[in-house]
Amino acid sequence: MTILLVCGLQCVLAAAPEAELSQATVGMQARIDQLVLPGPELEARPPANAREPIVLRVTGVFRHGTDFRYDLVYYGLAPGEYDLRDYLRRKDGSPLGDLPPIPVTIASLLPAGQVEPNRLEISSLPRLGGYRLLLVAGGVLWVAGLLAILFVGRKRSSLQAAGERKLSLADRLRPLVEQASAGDLPQARISELERLLLAYWRKRLGVESERPAVAMAQLRSHPAAGGLLRQLEEWLHQPNRRTDVDVAALLAPYHDLPADTLEPDAP
């Protein structure tokens, strides 16, 4: 009796794959558990391309005598009837042989007679207009204004710096000479100014090697150096005597000289 029951169960299991075992709708996952299939172990075949209508995975394999029991998970991408045998292969590379059919049905989600929507077409975007265009224009104007401010400010700074660099020695000496003429410049400042001018003219006229008395006499009589030097000497030795002087004439020889000419490290 036991032998008859075992034989009957084996017959039922062997015949099961020939019937419709599972059904699912498009895109929905379905399972087939404990499916006994004869022959060497099977595995899911890699898809040949992205358009295959069935995606199959083998999630469990169990020894069943000389055969194997499988847990399968699949889902369909297009409605129709399919055989999962087409998506399996032997692990050892041998042919499928007498593997029985594993039929599944993938049902459509759309009602009968209803067609799928048309494929979306990529079209060019419309031109910007209205509020968007106003925002873009405002942004462009803002950037242009910022650049203009930066450019004009930098240009003014450059011009101002250039103007400062163009100051002459005459411009630097003018307030000192005017204060000395008015009696407002201390004697120490007049003496320091005379010393700097003497050093400059001795170097410029090449009389540095001469004795101080000889060099002083040559500088006093020089047409360019003599005017301001003689006037400074007069202010030093006669501080209480004030006479009208032609400041422009005294400073004329210094108009073409840089403002830092009398600095210690100036060339």
Image (cartoon, rainbow, N blue to C red):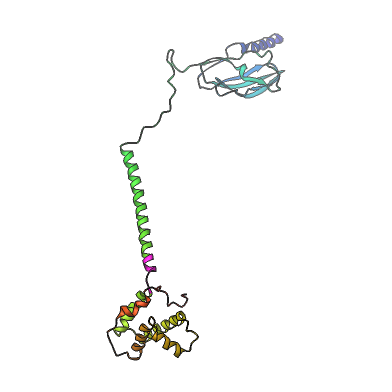
Tell me the magenta residue range: 162-168
Quadrant housing residue 177: bottom left
Residue at 35% across, 57% down: 152
Location of residue 156 with respect to 216 vertically, above or below? above
Magenta highlight on residue 166: yes
Front residue of this view, candidates 198 and 79: 198
Decide whether residue 76 is among the magenta residues: no
Q: Nearer the viewer, residue 107 or 126?
A: 126
Quadrant position of the N terminus in the picture: top right
Of 242 and 131, the residue lying toward us: 242
Front residue of this view, candidates 200 and 204: 204
Q: Is residue 73 left or right of residue 215?
A: right
Whether residue 170 sits left or right of residue 95 in the image: it is left
Q: Is residue 26 above or below residue 163?
A: above
Q: Is residue 36 above or below residue 259?
A: above
Q: Residue at x 40, y 30 (%)?
A: 124
Residue 63: image location, x then y, percent: 69, 21
Where residue 44 appears, as percent x and y from the top left, is: 63, 23
**What count of labels does the image hold?**
0
> x, y percentage for residue 222?
40, 83
Tell me if 231 is positioned left or right of 25 in this view. Answer: left
Q: Quadrant of residue 219?
A: bottom left
